[in-house]
Image: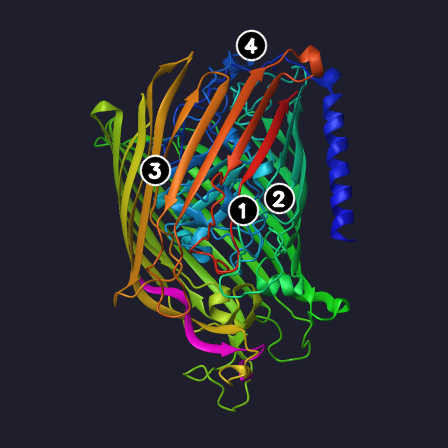
């Protein structure tokens, strides 16, 4: 099916869904579900991180029924009143965690409209995106660390896909179907694996309901989450909520739409969602190619159109003390790869992922165990890289490379009841995590060859145990000690390359490689409440990371990065020793968070460019052929030092026209060098920004400017300087309650957002394609969300 036909089909499907939602009046019910007398309890940091008190976060624990079950069965109180609606645009500052947590709330997600996690987080302090293909393929980069050091999870399970194996690969988690994003750094990241040294990007939604829905949710509360706990009264009436999310964008002529449905009754909750978007090539301010003159240019980034869609259905059953639920999700994306090579070969990626997830929680009526939680997931991912084998022959279009990932994961966590150890109240949580992964990357060019594709089929098995201990000395002073031990077995094959990585005429033979690693990690932290509602923290971490399959087994041309990657099966464990200090304030007219960190890496693994050019196979490396376009990149290890700081704040200056106006600002810097003083490649620039806002209970207006300084601290080989830029954004949003008798909706949010209003040439210093791909130019996005 052509891209144009798929777009038409997609837009038609979304339109019918939205029309169906508008005729849903008879199904809407504003009567809250009757629930037993169960209160919501805020978790301790050992259980889950918690956002500032401006809103109820998506992962706040819903307490189980009272230990006195007879009382819970006998008492049927009136429904709790909805919490007061927090105003839009308030900076969420997390103060009960031992390291910085960046929160993108539901209302900010709806205003942002970013199509990828990397685009969404692009300008957040300490975070940026890889922006290999803006709007299609952009993975978050945290403090200069990417792919193999940044975990991505959805509802507690790995996101799947192969975005950590190639910068051109998309992350199969779409913000359009997500309710909240959190970037977790520090000790809490140990829950998800030692490959999350940089941090974890955690997306949450209601695909597996963890609470019964209510029919009168507070504005801007995470969608579909109740103000009461999971167990529903068997005689309670059913409840149905529907939300539509739509927008149009000028910069890429984009259209997107989605619908979410949550229903519940008789102890069963059901969720379904469907979404889709389509864009054309996006507008850019000027000719995009720095070093390739004379290419066709029409004011748009060539070969940058995208299309994506997805759907999910899930359900949970709630019983006395807990719940169990499951969901199945399908993600599809067809997107073009910009850049000279991508445009010449009409390169596209056609990706599909099917994900099955199961999770549950049980709170037994015992004195020792507070809660038992589990997560189980399986993903089946496949994408074909499409393009012309011969740019002069339009009939040579076909599959150029295929990537597959079949992955299974399971995690069980037990949280103990707090106990008094005299010197402190101690809360312990421990867990076990296991996973299996099978990867392939075959190529049609030489199917019978010994080294077909980027790397041969490989697989890995991993099992880990972890423990968190929190010590509450007083209400003002807490400490945490955490540890994790893993064992990883990997299986693949690699030839023995010459020491100089140049062909020596000897035949290359496949050698089975079966490395195994047992990384051990630990952390300690202190959290102290200070006068003036300030909270200070200090953490120290020792984290070991096992090499990933691509770092060990790569041996071929990688078109996305224009490199010929050579792995090293002799890589050893990478070690990071980190110290982080922070100071935060979440309440009052002045809210801020400030963080400084220092990390020393031993055996830091990176792609080392050798300066040699290669063709499609190893024998072509360094032969002087002018057609060789791939830079030889060898996975190597060196000691390195990363240090940096982040700051952001909001200050409510005072009342204005019935609302509050104020100023906000941000700053971040990361400096990364090897121990000989040379620069680690592809590090974000220093950024400084600020702006003004005005808000009341319905309106939010903001204008913000971020200045990125030029990045001249570059690698010795294969990296060019990046010019600075000014990114000016503005937005206006209106939210209001509605009379559902008008159009069936009970709440509406409308808005306009302008991006890159100065129409600047913006190149991202961390992107492999920055010299050929500009970020989108001036654009305006209009959006509307309705809740029924």
Residue 514's spot in the image, x, y percent?
Answer: 49, 72
**Which residue is the extreme one toward the front?**
294
What secondary structure predominates along the stretch shown in magenta? strand
Q: Which residue is mark 3?
A: 666
Res 776 label: 1
Mark 4 against mark 3, which lies toward the viewer? Answer: 3
Dot 2 or dot 4: first in sequence order is: 4
The boundaries of the magenta stretch are: 602-619
Q: Which residue is mark 4?
A: 76
**Between marks 2 and 3, how big is the CA–CA gap?**
28 Å
Residue 238's spot in the image, x, y percent?
Answer: 68, 18
Neighbour tally class for label 4: few under 14, some 14-19, many 20 plus, Cα within 10 Å: few
Which one is nearer the viewer's eye here, 318 or 655? 655
Q: Which residue is mark 2?
A: 252
- Residue 71 drawn above or below residue 769: above
Neighbour tally class for label 2: few under 14, some 14-19, many 20 plus, Cα within 10 Å: many
Mark 1 against mark 3, which lies toward the viewer? Answer: 1
**Between marks 2 and 1, how big is the CA–CA gap?**
8 Å
């Amino acid at each position: 099916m052509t891209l144009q036909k798929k777009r038409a089909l997609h837009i038609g499907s979304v339109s019918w869904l939205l029309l169906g939602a508008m005729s849903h009046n008879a199904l809407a019910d504003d009567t809250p579900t009757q629930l037993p007398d169960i209160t919501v309890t805020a978790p301790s940091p050992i259980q889950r991180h918690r956002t500032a008190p401006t809103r109820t976060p998506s992962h706040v624990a819903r307490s189980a029924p009272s230990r006195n079950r007879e009382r819970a069965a006998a008492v049927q109180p009136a429904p709790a009143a909805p919490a007061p609606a927090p105003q839009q645009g308030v900076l969420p500052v997390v103060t009960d965690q031992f390291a910085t947590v960046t929160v993108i709330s539901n209302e900010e997600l709806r205003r942002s409209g970013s199509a990828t996690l990397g685009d969404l987080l692009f300008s957040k302090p300490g975070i940026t995106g890889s922006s290999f293909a803006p709007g299609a393929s952009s993975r978050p980069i945290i403090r200069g660390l990417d792919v193999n050091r940044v975990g991505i999870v959805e509802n507690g399970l790995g996101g799947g896909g192969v975005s950590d194996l190639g910068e051109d690969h998309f992350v199969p988690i779409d913000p359009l179907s997500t309710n909240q994003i959190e970037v977790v750094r520090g000790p809490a990241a140990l829950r998800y694996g030692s490959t999350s040294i940089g941090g974890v990007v955690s997306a949450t939604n209601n695909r597996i309901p963890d609470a019964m829905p209510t029919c009168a949710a507070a504005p801007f509360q995470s969608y579909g989450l109740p103000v009461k706990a999971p167990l529903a009264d068997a005689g309670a009436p059913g409840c149905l909520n529907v939300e539509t999310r739509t927008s149009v964008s000028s910069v890429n002529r984009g259209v997107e739409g989605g619908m979410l449905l949550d229903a519940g009754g008789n102890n069963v909750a059901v969720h379904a969602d469907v979404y889709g978007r389509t864009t054309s090539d996006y507008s850019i301010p000027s000719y995009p190619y720095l070093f390739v003159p004379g290419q066709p240019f029409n004011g748009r980034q060539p070969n940058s159109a995208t299309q994506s869609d997805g759907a999910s259905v899930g359900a949970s059953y709630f019983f006395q003390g807990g719940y169990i639920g499951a969901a199945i999700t399908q993600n599809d994306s067809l997107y073009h790869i910009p850049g000279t090579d991508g445009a010449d070969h009409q390169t596209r990626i056609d990706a599909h992922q099917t994900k099955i997830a199961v999770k549950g929680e049980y709170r037994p009526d015992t004195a020792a165990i507070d809660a038992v939680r589990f997560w189980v997931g399986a993903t089946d991912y496949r994408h074909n890289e499409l393009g012309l084998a011969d740019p002069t022959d339009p009939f040579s279009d076909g599959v150029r490379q295929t990537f597959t990932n079949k992955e299974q994961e399971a995690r069980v966590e037990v949280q103990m009841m707090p106990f008094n150890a005299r010197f402190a109240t101690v809360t312990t949580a421990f867990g076990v995590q296991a996973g299996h992964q099978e990867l392939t990357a075959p190529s049609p060019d030489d199917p019978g060859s010994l080294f077909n594709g980027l790397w041969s089929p490989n697989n890995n098995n991993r099992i880990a145990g972890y423990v968190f201990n929190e010590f509450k000395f007083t209400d003002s002073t807490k400490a945490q000690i955490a540890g994790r031990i893993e064992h990883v077995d990997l299986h693949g094959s690699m030839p023995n390359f010459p020491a100089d990585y140049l062909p020596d005429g000897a035949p290359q033979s496949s050698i089975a490689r079966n490395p195994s690693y047992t990384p051990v990690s630990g952390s300690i932290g202190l959290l102290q409440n200070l006068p003036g509602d300030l909270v200070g923290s200090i953490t120290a971490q020792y984290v070991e990371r096992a090499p990933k399959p691509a770092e060990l087994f790569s041996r071929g041309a990688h078109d996305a990065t224009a490199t010929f990657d050579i792995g090293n099966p002799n890589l050893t464990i990478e070690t990071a020793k980190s110290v982080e200090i922070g100071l935060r304030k979440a309440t009052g007219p002045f809210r801020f968070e400030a963080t400084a960190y220092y990390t020393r890496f031993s055996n830091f693994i990176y792609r080392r460019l050798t300066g040699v050019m290669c063709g499609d196979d190893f024998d072509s490396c360094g032969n002087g052929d002018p057609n060789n376009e791939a830079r030889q990149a060898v996975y190597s290890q060196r000691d390195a030092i990363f240090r940096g700081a982040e700051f952001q704040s909001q200050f409510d200056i005072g009342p204005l026209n019935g609302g509050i106006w104020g100023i906000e600002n941000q700053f971040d810097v990361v400096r990364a060098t090897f121990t000989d003083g040379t620069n680690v490649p592809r590090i974000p620039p220093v950024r400084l920004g600020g702006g003004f806002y005005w808000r009341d209970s319905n309106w939010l207006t903001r204008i913000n400017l971020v200045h990125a300084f030029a990045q001249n601290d570059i690698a010795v080989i294969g990296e060019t300087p990046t010019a600075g830029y000014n990114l000016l954004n503005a937005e206006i949003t209106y939210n209001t309650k509605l009379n559902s008798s008008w159009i069936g909706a009970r709440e509406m949010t409308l808005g306009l957002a302008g991006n890159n209003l100065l129409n600047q040439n913006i190149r991202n210093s961390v992107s492999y394609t920055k010299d050929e791909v500009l970020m989108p130019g001036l654009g305006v996005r209009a959006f509307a969300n309705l809740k029924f």
